[in-house]
Amino acid sequence: MRLLLLLVVLLPGVSLAATLPDFRKIVRDSSPAVVKIIVQSSGAQDAQGQPNPEEIPEYLRRFFEFRGAPPSQRQRMGMGSGFIISDDGYIVTNNHVVAGADSVLVRMSDRREFDAEVIGTDPRSDLALLRIQASDLPVLELAAGGDLEVGEWVLAIGSPFGLDYSVSAGIVSGKGRSLPTERNENYVPFIQTDVAINPGNSGGPLFNLEGEVVGVNSQIFTRSGGSIGLSFAIPVSVVHNVVEQLRSDGRVTRGWLGVTIQDVDKNLAASFGLQRPRGALVAQVAADSPAAKGGLREGDVIITFDGHDIPTSADLPHVVGLIEPDRVVLVEVVRAKKRQKLKVTVGGLDADDSYSLAAGEPEQGYGGRLGLVVEAAKADILERMGINGGVLVREVVPESVAATAGILPGDVITLIGSSPIKSAEAFNASVDKLPANSSVPLRLIRRGAPMFIGLKLND
């Protein structure tokens, strides 16, 4: 009996040990191609994401690049990581590692140092391509595609806090994570891992167990400045696309539709005839954009794009951004509760306009069923928003249908159901015709941003 109990206790541990990965060969083979990047820049700001020597614990400072007095305000030093992708000296790193650099120095694991040329940068993906004048260099292989699975082991090599060629391992925690930039752009479906990533790891490679690079470490989520097990890497599919363009053209062009989109919630799903929330709801189509020329309309719900399912609105930019401009793709939408397929010629990325909202005149109309006091929007407001009609919400009755749906004073309503709203009279007429006990989509513009809201009528 004791022997049996001992086997029960030990066997799970033996099985676990037998399945744990051995990273030693990956580290031996790959480390020579991982580089440390040291950046000098002028100005009052450190290189983004790089550690300030004053914030580094005293016992770690001796490992750091800063010696003696900290750099002056006029000359700053930052650092990050990178990796060699060709034996003639091309190196991948993060854009934020080299942004604003006056000089870039690449240090290899054998202590050789090279001045690097910045071939091109892409802030939208946070990638940069460098080159050093050298030959017969060790290189890393980029994985062919994005075949990672959640739970898969991954490994990172970099120089956190200046500690050269540190190795950390973990698993893939999630895929397709959306982390909008300060400009609210979202073109990278980040890989989330629990690998210990810290300042200085930026730009370093993320490996699978085959020793292939599956991502470029880019960001961490932290409240303390150090790793808490939430790190994000740029997937290799994006790296391939961006690096090829930087290498050939020195710049990056992305696919562009010219739409503003939003998620579909439960109420909106019901109002559009969807069985469950899914897809990217088109809230606005820019004039003369590829979307407009391809027949996309406000109120369409995009559910597939170029053969890719679109579970949420955040997934659409990830797909569109990787498509070459001028390519014709098939887009499946739900319109008027029916599926429809469109052919759209994808354009090149352009900037969207932003608009502001001003106050209007006193009350001119009332939608009693919704609990809204509205008025015709002034011509200058409509012009700034690029629309030719709408009503301005002056008041929202507490606990009304509108209040429950989240409509706010200052919103400009442009569509109820399939009826365009260009005046207070049109608003009242449309509200009166709404079916009882139904779910209806309402389109509005809030602080310059178009969006849909689902109204649930209970009368």
Image (cartoon, helix red, strand yellow):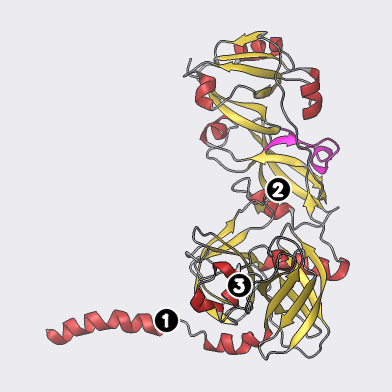
Residue bearing the label numbered 2: 183
Residue type at mark 2 is Arg
Helix, strand, or loop for circle 1? helix
113 versus 101 height, above or below: below
User: Does residue 209 appear in this view?
Assistant: no
Q: Residue furthest front?
A: 69
User: Does residue 359 appear in this view?
Assistant: yes
Residue type at mark 1 is Thr
Is 317 contained in the magenta span? Answer: no
Neighbor class of circle 1 (other Cα within 10 Å; few <14, some 14-19, many 20+) is: few
Query: Where's the N terminus, which quadrant?
Result: bottom left
Which residue lies at the image location 54% right of the left edge and 40% below the top edge?
Answer: 277
Would you say 435 lies left or right of 354 here? Answer: left
Which of discs 2 and 1 lies nearer the camera? The answer is 2
Q: For the image shown, how many numbered marks are present on the structure?
A: 3
Residue 380, by quadrant, is top right
Q: Which residues are magenta?
A: 281-298
Q: CA distance from mark 1 to mark 3?
A: 28 Å
* Rendering coords of residue 389 (x, y %): 76, 20
Task: Point out the tag, 3 or 2, that comes first from the N-terminus.
Answer: 2
Task: Point out the tag, 1 or 3, that comes first from the N-terminus.
Answer: 1
334 versus 402 height, above or below: below
Task: Point out the tag, 2 or 1, that comes first from the N-terminus.
Answer: 1
Residue type at mark 3 is Asn
Residue bearing the label numbered 1: 19
Which residue lies at the image location 81% right of the left edge and 50% below the top edge?
Answer: 349
* Rendering coords of residue 399 (x, y %): 46, 19
Q: Nearer the viewer, residue 297 or 218?
A: 218
* Rendering coords of residue 256 (x, y %): 79, 49
Q: Nearer the viewer, residue 191 or 40?
A: 40
Q: CA distance from mark 3 to mark 2?
A: 24 Å
Residue 352, by quadrant, is top right
